[in-house]
Image: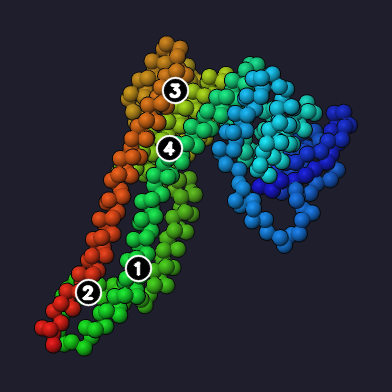
Amino acid sequence: MPLYKYEGIRRSDGRTVKGVLDADSEKALRAALKRDGIMPTSTNVKGEGKDRNEVDFGRYFNRVKKADIALFTRQMATLTRSGVSLVESLTAVIDQCDKHDLKSAITDVRDQVNQGTSLSDAFARYPSFFDRLFCNMVHAGEQSGTLEQVLERLADFIEASDRLKNKVVGAMAYPAFMMFVGVVVINILMIVVVPKVTSIFENFDKELPIYTRILVAVSDFMSQFWWLVLALLVIGIWSFRKWKKTEKGEYSWHRFTLRAPIFGKLTMMVAISRFSKTLATLLSSGVPLLSAMDITKGVLGNVVLEKVVVDASTSIREGESISEPLKASGYFPPVVTHMIAVGERTGQLEAMLENVSTSYDAQVDAKVMALTSILEPLLIVIMGVGAGGIAAAVLLPLVQINEFI
């Protein structure tokens, strides 16, 4: 989403205002300014003065990450707790920020706050950096006068979520790389090496072993029709992604990811950890339960579980508990729903959700370590069996070459 610099006149007092804002297009920018009561007088893409043919490769290596948002939030929490005003705190953070896009956004946030806009509304202008959860928590902190505590909780939450994501992605990276290397090696053997070696057998008037003939047939097919295999692979991936974007396809795929062997349980554990941590953080920050549930469903990343949370919200509106619809869904384990039910009865729902999150974070760690320790040797065995099978199918007839002669 491009950043736009703008200047305009505020309708309420006629003052000239300027700043930067991210929007999909100039039309969307003007609509956003109009909603904020600003009549734009000039707009242009930030950095438009540079050569348009110049590609800014630096921005691809200087992208804003969750860790940068967490650091910014923690710095703001420290400064506001020390009694520094919001504008001065934002100015101090701007001076230390080394991410160009984030620095521009924070600069505009400071200008908006200086002009009387609330901090949460100023953050809401940059959803790519400050999501709905972030803005709602900041708003609750402003309303309750506990902004510094809310910012501290936000920093902890962002760091914990980022750490969990990196842990899962990092653990799966090596097995994925091993699988990719194995596929590449076997394809090179089948397309390049096998045809050259098996050409030796063409002059011998004797039938080859069945596994060697199968290998030769597969190799010939891949050598002649590799383009067809590649085209089918591309079409298959494109069709799958298009199907997954449909409502039915997305629901079916997400349901499969929750029920898949081995990885389904890990996906469910990560989702429960996110749900518990997010809901506990929102409730402890003063966000109303229904609003907190509505925000929480957006961090699960699974439409099946989102539907479960929506059903739970409906039950709450009708005066029922949270735990019952979660239990009835069959996706949330009994121990989780039981702890939530106890938290509701005792008025310690936030504490119980924190306990659930801590427990499932530990279980995710153990599960990831176990999967990694199993997957690595398993992939090595599979690659060895594949390469060894190809070698055996080629070498066995070579060993019998004297008999052929």
| Lower position in the chain sequence, tag 4 or tag 1 | 1
Question: Is there CB contact under 8 Å for labels 3 and 1?
Answer: no
Q: Position of residue 370 (x, y in %)?
A: 30, 40
Q: Position of residue 189 (x, y in %)?
A: 32, 71
Callout 3: 10 Å neighbours few (<14), some, many (20+)? some
Relative placement, left or right, of 175 versus 115 is: left
Question: Is there CB contact under 8 Å for labels 4 and 3?
Answer: no
Which of 115 and 14 lies nearest the eye of the viewer? 115
Question: Where does label 4 land, which residue?
Answer: 304
Distance from disc 3 to disc 2, alpha carbons, whole Å, reads: 59 Å
Q: Nearer the viewer, mark 4 or mark 1?
A: 1
Say which amino acid is labelled 3.
Answer: Glu
Residue 238 visible in rendering: yes
Q: Nearer the viewer, mark 4 or mark 2?
A: 2
Distance from disc 1 to disc 2, alpha carbons, whole Å, reads: 15 Å
Question: Where does label 2 land, which residue?
Answer: 394
Residue 31 visible in rendering: no
Say which amino acid is labelled 4.
Answer: Val
| Lower position in the chain sequence, tag 3 or tag 2 | 3
* Residue occupying image coordinates x 37% and y 35%: 365
Callout 2: 10 Å neighbours few (<14), some, many (20+)? many
Say which amino acid is labelled 1.
Answer: Asn
| Lower position in the chain sequence, tag 1 or tag 2 | 1
* Secondary structure at numbered mark 2: helix
Question: Is there CB contact under 8 Å for labels 4 and 1?
Answer: no
* Residue occupying image coordinates x 34% and y 74%: 191
* Residue occupying image coordinates x 69% and y 18%: 83
| Lower position in the chain sequence, tag 3 or tag 1 | 1
Question: Where does label 1 land, which residue?
Answer: 187
Say which amino acid is labelled 2.
Answer: Val
Residue with the most extreme left position = 403
Question: Is there CB contact under 8 Å for labels 4 and 2?
Answer: no
